[in-house]
Amino acid sequence: MSGDGFHVHGPHDHAVEHAAHGSDGFSNNIAVMTAILATVGATFGYLGGATQNDAALFKNNAAIDKTQAANSWNYYQAKSSKQNLAELAMVLPGVDPKKYEADVARYKSEKDDIKKEAEKWEESSKEWNHKSDEAMHQHHQWALATTAEQIAISLAAITLLTRKKWMMGLAYGVAGVGIALGAFAWFHVDPVGQMLAKLGGGAVGH
């Protein structure tokens, strides 16, 4: 067993080895094609992983802000209880209402500030959740683009074995689809999703 570890050969490696043994132009073109596709696929995979990490980070921020909102609402409820007690004390027999008027007014003012704070945290949590959903959707787009490039590389390897030009055309076509999907992900465009949404909306309307 070698101390250098082991290496698993992929379709691109086989394409390069095949081109090395046979110097015909057809094999060379496939080798160059698979090298480019491997680079593009690796880039798509990296971007997909980055967007997945962003989605997780945004979701964590949403959870933190949601907790902050819950704490603020609990504080708001505590102030409401104190206000209710002060208002109850004002109507008790033998008690001077003016003694508690200032407390009631203070609690109302404090509650307004706390409510605004709680609503701010809730809105922030919603925004983080929305960003997380968008990042996760973009991750799925990158994953589809990466998968298409991997399929194209596999088709290129089959092309070397069969030496069928139509198979090479198919490999180029799938690679083109993958690049298009990657471009959609890069520019945050989802024509397929928009089309499905329209079709779904039309179905619901009927």
Image (cartoon, rainbow, N blue to C red):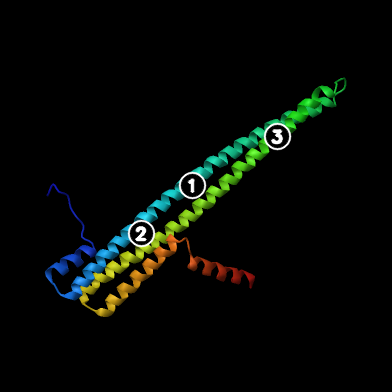
Check disc 1 and report the residue beneath it: 58
Mark 2 or mark 3: name the one nearer the start of the chain: 2
Image spot of residue 148 (x, y percent):
35, 66
Q: Give the structural element (helix, strand or loop) at label 3.
A: helix
| Residue located at (49% from left, 68% from top) | 191
Q: Which of marks 1 and 3 is nearer the N terminus?
A: 1
Tag shown at residue 46: none
Q: Are marks 1 and 2 in contact (CB under 8 Å)?
A: no
Q: Which amino acid does label 2 sit on?
A: Phe
Above or below, 54 relative to 141: above
Under tag 1, what secondary structure? helix
Which residue carries the number 3 mark? 111
Q: Which numbered dot is residue 44?
A: 2
Say few, some or many: other residues with alpha carbon within 10 Å of mark 3 (under 14 / 14 to 19 / 20 or more). Answer: many
Q: How far apart are marks 1 and 3 (CA)?
A: 29 Å
Mark 2 nearby-residue class (10 Å; few <14, some 14–19, many ≥20): many
- CA–CA distance between discs 2 and 3? 50 Å
